[in-house]
């Protein structure tokens, strides 16, 4: 039986443009290879990849009643995500990001706030939490109206395991936002830059150790082409990245979270879960957004071909 995983948080419309190595002169037009509209956001991307890996993936989010919201929601449904807990509101507009991907696959963003900033605890009903076994919060930093500590405490009261994937805090709240919740977060997932901002420690291993002191069972730090590291009470372990031809890194960190959580929720050892996360993140970069992820077998083959 599949373990129900509820992803809570970011669902936005992503307009992905590739390749963009510079902007054209004012008033000029420059052709590109791809312009696509996807669902995006930490929680939505992780849910989509989880569904493609065969998980019982569910999403709780807030979007507007607009064309961008229609497109984002349809994309999630097409990936196999249960969207019954997504709330639509006519009083706000769907948050949207324009993702500019350069020739090396690296990305920059233009972001318009909207529904994401309005998402609050009332948009995540008890029924959605009660039927999950793992509750994953993706992109808490932009959810200004969400009380993360209350949400995680409520999930714990229903016996759920919990995880958090941070994102870059454009509002500068950092530990003021996540600190009160960390004692109830089983798996904290972050990246090097965010870990440094949260912990005040520059080196990723030191940052992970510091974050672990707040009570999480494990801290996973995503390091891009350097792979990832895992900190537990037994110490810090580094895991190298898998070698692939990179086209777009937009969804890589969210795919890592999906692979890691699939492993952890299935009772796999955490080191095996990190390897699965690394492979999912690497495979994800070979096409736009999460389109390269087709099945768990494809991710496993990458692990088998390149022992991590």
Image: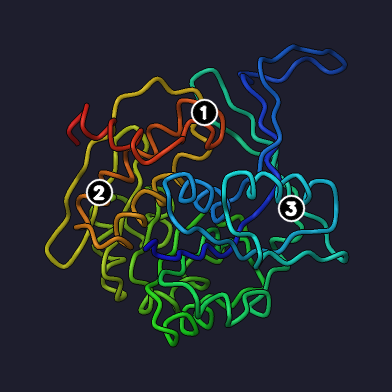
Q: Relative to the observer, which residue lies in front, 208 or 63?
A: 63
Tell me: 21 left or right of 15: left
90 relative to 76 in the view: left or right: right
Identify the disc placed on residue 51: none
Quadrant where the N terminus is found in the figure:
bottom left
The spot of residue 175 in percent (x, y) is: 46, 69
Residue picked out by circle 1: 248
Residue appearing at x 45%, y 30% in the figure:
285
View extreme (front): residue: 1
Residue at 29%, 44% in the rendered image = 276
Residue placed under numbered mark 2 in the picture:
229
Q: For residue 211, what is the image quadrant?
A: bottom left
**Front position in the image: 177 or 51:** 51
Looking at marks 3 and 2 on the same chain, the residue that comes earlier in the sequence is marked by 3
Marks 1/3: CA distance?
21 Å
Which residue in the structure is indicated by mark 3? 95
Q: Residue furthest left?
A: 234
The image shows residue 6, relative to residue 80, as above or below, that is: below
Rounded to the nearest whole Å, what is the CA distance between mark 1 and mark 2?
Answer: 22 Å
Looking at the picture, does residue 249 appear above or below residue 167?
Answer: above
Q: Residues within 10 Å of mark 1 (few under 14, many from 20)?
A: many
N-terminal of the pair, mark 1 or mark 3, is 3
Left or right of 28, for residue 147: left
């Amino acid at each position: 039986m599949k373990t129900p995983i509820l992803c809570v948080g970011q669902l936005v419309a992503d307009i992905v443009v590739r390749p963009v190595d510079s902007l054209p002169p004012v008033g000029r037009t420059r052709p590109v290879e791809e312009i696509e509209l996807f669902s995006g956001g930490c929680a939505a991307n992780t849910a989509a990849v989880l569904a493609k890996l065969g998980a019982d993936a569910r999403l709780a989010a807030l979007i507007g009643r607009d064309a961008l919201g229609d497109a984002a929601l349809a994309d999630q449904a097409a990936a196999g995500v249960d969207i019954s807990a997504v709330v639509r509101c006519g009083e706000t507009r769907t948050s949207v990001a324009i993702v500019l991907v350069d020739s090396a696959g690296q990305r920059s963003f233009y972001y318009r706030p909207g529904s994401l900033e309005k998402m609050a605890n009332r948009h995540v009903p008890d029924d959605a939490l009660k039927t999950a076994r793992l509750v994953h919060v993706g992109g808490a930093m932009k959810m200004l109206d969400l009380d993360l500590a209350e949400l995680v405490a409520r999930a714990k009261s229903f016996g759920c395991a919990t995880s958090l994937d941070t994102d870059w805090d454009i509002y500068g709240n950092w530990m003021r936002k996540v600190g009160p919740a960390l004692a109830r977060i089983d798996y904290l997932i972050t990246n090097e830059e965010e870990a440094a901002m949260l912990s005040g420690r520059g080196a990723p291993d030191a940052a992970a150790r510091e974050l672990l002191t707040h009570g999480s069972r494990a801290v996973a730090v995503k390091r891009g082409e350097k792979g990832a590291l895992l900190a537990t009470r037994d110490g810090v372990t580094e895991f190298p990245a898998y070698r692939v031809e990179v086209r777009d890194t937009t969804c890589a960190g969210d795919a890592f979270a999906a692979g890691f959580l699939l492993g952890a929720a299935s009772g796999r050892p955490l080191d095996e879960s990190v390897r699965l996360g690394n492979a999912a993140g690497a495979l994800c970069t070979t096409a736009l957004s999460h389109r390269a992820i087709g099945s768990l077998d494809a991710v496993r083959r990458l692990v088998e071909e390149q022992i991590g």
